[in-house]
């Protein structure tokens, strides 16, 4: 009887150990994916920010910004930049 209880405890310990090890591997994989996605978002954020600076530099007299079609582009770029800024502030 004692041998049966010891065997059951050993088997349960091994099963629980495997479950914990498997879950830990999955968490590590997801954490590495998060790091890659965070780097991508930061690189994209930098690209949008540099684009915004360059566009403002080009359009210092606001000739393009007042144009309907180009102004639409300016407004969308500004909206994207603000959304990315809010997201970056949220994750930091």
Image (tube, grey):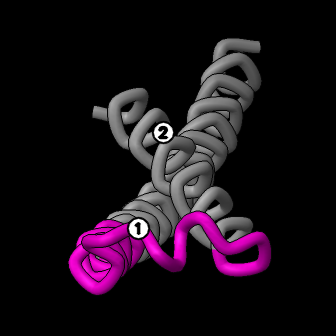
Up-down relation of residue 86 to residue 61 (above or below): above
Q: Main secondary structure of the magenta part?
A: helix
Q: Which mark is residue 62?
A: 1
Q: Position of residue 50 (x, y in %)?
A: 26, 77
Q: Secondary structure at mark 2?
A: helix
Asked whether residue 74 appears in the rendered view, the answer is yes
Residue 25: in sight, yes or no? no
Residue at 60% over, 49% down: 79
The image position of residue 84, as x and y in percent, is 48, 50
Tags 2 and 1 touching, CB below 8 Å:
no
Q: Residue at position x 58%, y 56% from top?
A: 80
Which range of residues does the magenta coloring cover?
A: 47-70
Q: Residues within 10 Å of mark 1 (few under 14, many from 20)?
A: few
What's the residue at 44%, 56% (across, down)?
31
Q: Nearer the viewer, mark 2 or mark 1?
A: 1
Q: Nearer the viewer, residue 63 or 82?
A: 63
Quickly name the residue at label 2.
87
**Quadrant of the snapshot with the C terminus:** top left
In which quarter of the view is residue 90 placed?
Answer: top left
Quadrant assignment, res 89: top left
Q: Is residue 48 magenta?
A: yes
Residue 46 locus on image (x, y percent) = 28, 71
């Amino acid at each position: 009887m004692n041998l049966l209880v010891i065997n059951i405890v050993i088997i349960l310990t091994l099963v629980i150990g495997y479950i914990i090890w498997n879950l830990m591997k999955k968490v590590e994989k997801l954490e590495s994916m998060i790091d890659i996605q965070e780097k991508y978002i930061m690189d994209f954020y930098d690209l949008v920010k540099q684009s915004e600076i360059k566009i403002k530099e080009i359009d210092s007299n606001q000739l393009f910004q007042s144009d309907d079609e180009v102004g639409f582009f300016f407004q969308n770029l500004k909206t994207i930049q603000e959304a990315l800024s809010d997201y970056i502030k949220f994750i930091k």
